[in-house]
Image: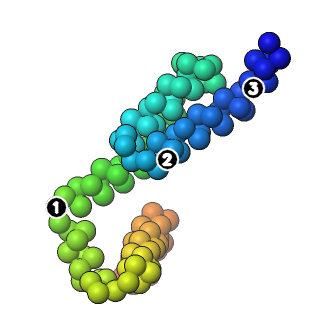
Amino acid sequence: MAALSMVTPATISTCILLATLLLFASERVRHDLVALIALFASIVTGLVKPGEAFSGFSDPAVLAVAGVLVVGRAVELSGAASAIAKVAIPAKAGFAVRLTGLLIIAAVVGLHEQHRRSGHHDADRERDCA
């Protein structure tokens, strides 16, 4: 009976997290299904109330990640991603060079998007037009 009292919410969440990481790493189960399994395990074990379980899906960050995944997949399927990669990153480059090139491209795109959203581009246009 003493062993059951040692099962705390922290222990349960750690077990769910480790199982989730193992499933992600194994790549035997689709990532979206792994996430749902972890969510339902959290509900069944009482870590998360059923009414609160899906409230996180309305968070703007979750919607942004979902949008990026959809657009990224569309770019990949269209062939645009491989075309850009062939031009930007040498085919004979080693893994480290290709990874660095990819990270630089991602950083430039991210900085451009951040600049665009910050509103600075509107001020630049107004200054240039004056």
Q: Which mark is residue 61?
A: 2
Is residue 58 visible to the viewer in this orientation of the structure? no
- Residue furthest to the left: 78
To which residue does mark 3 refer? 8
Considering the numbered disc 3 on the image, is that residue within a helix, a strand or a loop?
loop
Considering the numbered disc 1 on the image, is that residue within a helix, a strand or a loop?
helix
Hey, what amino acid is under mark 3? Thr
For marks 1 and 2, the one nearer the N-term is 2
| Residue 40 drawn at (x, y percent) | 49, 25
Q: Dividing the picture into quarters, in which one does residue 13 lie?
A: top right
| Colour setting | rainbow
- Residue furthest to the top: 1
| Residue 15 drawn at (x, y percent) | 63, 34
Which one is in front in this view, the residue at disc 2 or the one at disc 3? 3
Q: Residue at x 39, y 35 (%)?
A: 33
Q: Dividing the picture into quarters, in which one does residue 93 lie?
A: bottom left
Q: Residue at x 46, y 50 (%)?
A: 25
Q: Residue at x 53, y 25 (%)?
A: 41
| Residue 24 drawn at (x, y percent) | 46, 46
Seen from the viewer's position, the closer of residues 130 and 75 is 75
Seen from the viewer's position, the closer of residues 2 and 121 is 2
Contact between labelled residues 1 and 3, with CB atoms less than 8 Å apart: no
Residue 61 is left or right of residue 83, and the answer is right
Alpha-carbon span between mark 1 and mark 2 = 26 Å
Q: Quadrant of the C terminus?
A: bottom left
To which residue does mark 1 refer? 78
Alpha-carbon span between mark 3 and mark 1 = 48 Å
Residue 86 is left or right of residue 35, and the answer is left
